[in-house]
Image: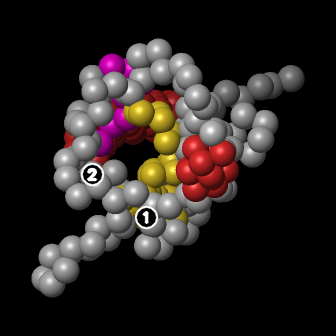
């Protein structure tokens, strides 16, 4: 019995030794026929419901690091979520990991920023900021009341509006010309009438009153 106990000491020593965490490298394809959770907040018995892949941690972040070599382009990107602790300003982002700036941010209140220089506007889609305005290209024609018009539609509207104004101006000018002609005709007739009255006054014989 003592001999058996002595033989168990090495095994017991291994079992009682502190566990040392180490990186695990899998030099083959890895297939998980189920769900997976990554992050410091993952728990034993994690409830996945219908999720296939879960990132669970304070402000989780996924880095896409391109290690292409030679003439191939390489750039790193990251995506994740951030917040201020209140949950009001929580947002999802796509980030240029090399420059360290977000190029797309989606906020809980519906705000969206597109581009590294875009400033957030509550409840709006922003593509720039004061002094860093940017164009929106290839915008389709507006079809309903709340659609934004594009430059072509605006130019067509401006051309049609100016043409209408020109037509109205021409019609008003013609009316003023006609009115001016009528006023001149009335003035001529008034002058003729005054001349006749003057002639009648001059041709009337003088009347002498005798006491």
Residue 162 to residue 193: above or below? below
Residue 177 is tagged as: none
Corner quadrant of residue 64 = bottom left
**Where does residue 107 sit, x and y in percent of width and height?**
58, 38
Q: To which residue does mark 2 refer?
A: 137
Label 1 secondary element:
strand
Question: In this view, which residue lies farthest toward the top?
Answer: 49
Kindly identify the residue that appears in the image at 33 percent across and 51 percent down. 136
Residue 38 to residue 16: above or below? above
Predominant secondary structure, magenta span: loop
Q: CA distance from mark 2 to mark 1?
A: 22 Å
Kindly identify the residue that appears in the image at 50 percent across and 61 percent down. 22
**Where does residue 36 sit, x and y in percent of width and height?**
42, 33
Kindly identify the residue that appears in the image at 47 percent across and 73 percent down. 99
Question: In this view, which residue lies farthest toward the left?
Answer: 71
Label 2 secondary element:
loop
Is 148 inside the magenta-drawn segment?
Answer: yes
């Amino acid at each position: 019995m003592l001999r058996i106990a002595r033989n168990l000491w090495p095994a017991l020593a291994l079992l009682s030794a502190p566990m040392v965490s180490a990186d695990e490298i899998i030099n083959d394809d890895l297939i998980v026929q189920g769900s997976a959770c990554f992050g410091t907040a993952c728990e034993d018995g994690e409830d996945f419901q219908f999720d296939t892949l879960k990132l669970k941690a304070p402000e989780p972040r996924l880095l896409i690091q391109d290690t292409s070599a030679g003439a191939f382009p390489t750039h790193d990107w990251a995506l994740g979520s951030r917040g201020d602790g209140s949950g009001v300003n929580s947002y999802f982002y796509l980030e240029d990991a090399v420059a360290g700036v977000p190029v797309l941010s989606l906020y809980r209140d519906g705000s969206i920023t597109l581009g590294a220089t875009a400033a957030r506007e509550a409840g709006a889609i922003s593509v720039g900021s004061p002094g860093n305005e940017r164009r929106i290209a290839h915008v389709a024609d507006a079809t309903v009341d709340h659609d934004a018009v594009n430059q072509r539609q605006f130019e067509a509207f401006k051309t049609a509006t100016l043409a209408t104004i020109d037509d109205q101006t021409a019609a008003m000018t013609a009316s003023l010309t006609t009115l001016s002609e009528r006023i001149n005709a009335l003035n001529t007739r008034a002058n003729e009438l005054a001349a006749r009255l003057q002639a009648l006054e001059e041709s009337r014989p003088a009347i002498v009153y005798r006491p």
